[in-house]
Image: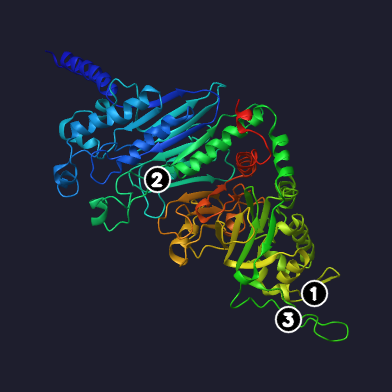
Amino acid sequence: MSPDGRDQQAIEAIKRLQEIERSYQGQKEVTIKVGNSPIWLVEVGDLHVGSIATDYDKLFGLRDTILSEPNIGLVLLGDEIEGLKKEYLETNTARTPIDVQVQIDFLRNSFLEPLAKEKKILAMVSGYWGHTAWIQDATTVNPWIALVKGTGIPILLQGGILRIMFSNGYVHSKQIFHYPPRISDFDPVFGLRNVAYKESEGADRLQGYSKGHCHVAMVAKENYPDASITPYYISSGTLKGSNSDLPLDRFGIKLGKPPTDPIGQGVEILPRRVGKTYERNYPVISFEHGQVINNAMKLLDRAEQQHLTDELIGKILKRAPKPRIKCIEERSDTARAPYNEMPRHPKKDNGEPAITKKDLAPQFDTLFFDIRSELPITVHMIANARLGASYEGYGPLKNFLSNYVVDNPYGLTVFLRNMIDADMATEVSRDTALDKYIKIMKSNGDQTLAFMLDENLRKNAWKREKKGGGKTSPGVAVATKISRATGARIIHDLSRIKLAVGPDSGVENKPVYTGVYADKLLRYGSYSRPTYGLRRIYDLHQAVKPGYIVGGHMPYSGIAVFYDRGNPETKYPVLIGTGWWAAYVDSIGQGNVSPGAVPGQAIVLMPGRSAKDYMAFPTSNPDETDYIPKGLTLLTGLKLAGINPNRILR
């Protein structure tokens, strides 16, 4: 052979082998066509079939849940089998009672094939380092092809894209990993977020990102300034070692890690309807949350298609008793060391003090409310309006409250940090900003539960008289003035508000929802991770873990729900990073003045007759804060109004 002839044949051979090699890798993209109804996508990693620590009852329960309804689909996020690795003799080989062939046969026969027959498995991720991949590492046999051969289950490349095409032409796209580059012990979706950040809107940034691998459950949805896509992130739990009644995973024990988190994470996807310019999707942390949201969204979707939503909600509100809100003084705690807001040298005309300490409104470490309601309650978290600043958010906030909160007896409000701009304490025009704040707060009447005595209202300049431009603004006990004018109670950084929500009188037989409200974030704040600082406060600075924690001063906003088996109130605590009603962020220095992320965050609390009925749903943007409560109100209220839900679903 001549050198040129040899090189040509070598290249031709390699190109043919490239085609073969590519055919044995997962697909870069998979498109699944569905109908035109909402889809509940259950996303599960780390089944670990074959391990002695795996919960096989939950495996069959997962299968049966997916088969139970036509609009539920499954995505598999890797490590479906335990595999075998001789290097891990004590933690793997000796704890795996069945060999790899039996693992594959068992998973195929009892799990994959029944689901594939009904076209319930939308994709399986492949091509990663991990338990399933040990087979490939040791033998070069492709385990994913062995698992799905003949079933029609699509195999996705690690980091591949799943597209769900609804019959109306709308496409929902998401990226699937077993594990993405980089992980964090305190932020399970850290790697997924980094992938999204590197992608540009209009090109590669997608609606969702999901992973397994870490055995840590978390779902999040985040807003970034000037972004039209609000991505959600899903980190899946596992069947291995997550049931405390079964053996724990010895590998985790040796690492000193806590028991693993259970599966059940997923997302509800609503196809974009005519006239909508945005997608509706809602990530869920558990099967229980998913079932409730799925049922609620199916009702809402059909009601909207038939233009019945307002009529049905109206009938429900007319039939349901208006909620009763009562502050339980004996269960509330006044501040141990209240902030001294006494004005400097305030005098009446006769020379007597204009105000004494006895005249100051009480400040609270803990507030306890009994809310008698048969329908879900929505608590709106209002922050960062910067009233008085040239970039204030008075107009947008007023419109939001008018459209979503005012005149809704089930919409409560808590006003948090930075409602009055930080510079207003020193301005003679501060009374105008203060009046705006009072007006905004009074618009929701006695459904405003509390407001925060934040850093801006603690400035000493409020206590001193201010003169300028021929005007005089006397010193004022600013929080007391707001409280007296509105009836709202005063809380401070990391105060707690407890809400007992249910149809019965009294608080003993209701779920109690405890929220911690933060001003700033104890230097744990992150400019790029909206709920990270809240999570660190939850982990490090809350001796008794609350059901949710909300607030912060960072530029991005969003929600997250994670799993904590030790929480005394709920195993699914919530984090809510509030957005910005003001046009620009002022909390990261004048050299970093820039737009903030979308506001309108809230938490929807389900009524109940016992602590077991506890279920909370955070919302990440104004539209979600509107349609999630509507769907849950339809779910809980139609029968109350004498309407059979099946009539709506027809």
Mark 2 = which residue?
191
Q: Nearer the viewer's eye, disc 3 or disc 2? A: 3
- Looking at the image, residue 535 sits to the left or right of residue 473; the answer is left
Mark 1 closeness class: few <14, some 14–19, many ≥20 residues within 10 Å:
some
The percent position of residue 622, horizontal first and vertical second, equals: 64, 44
Q: Earlier in the sequence, mark 1 or mark 3?
A: 3
Residue farthest toward the bottom in the current orientation of the protein: 351
Tell me where residue 382 sits by quadrant: bottom right
Q: Earlier in the sequence, mark 3 or mark 2?
A: 2
* Quadrant position of the C terminus in the picture: top right
- Contact check, label 3 and label 2, Cβ < 8 Å: no
Mark 3 closeness class: few <14, some 14–19, many ≥20 residues within 10 Å:
few
Mark 1 = which residue?
474
| Nearer to the camera, 650 or 227 | 650
The residue under the point 62% across, 61% down is 506
The percent position of residue 646, horizontal first and vertical second, equals: 60, 30
Vertical position of residue 305 compared to residue 357: above or below? above
The residue under the point 55% across, 36% down is 295
Mark 3 = which residue?
358
Tell me where residue 238 sits by quadrant: top left
Residue farthest toward the right in the current orientation of the protein: 349
Q: CA distance from mark 1 to mark 3?
A: 20 Å
The percent position of residue 552, horizontal first and vertical second, equals: 56, 59
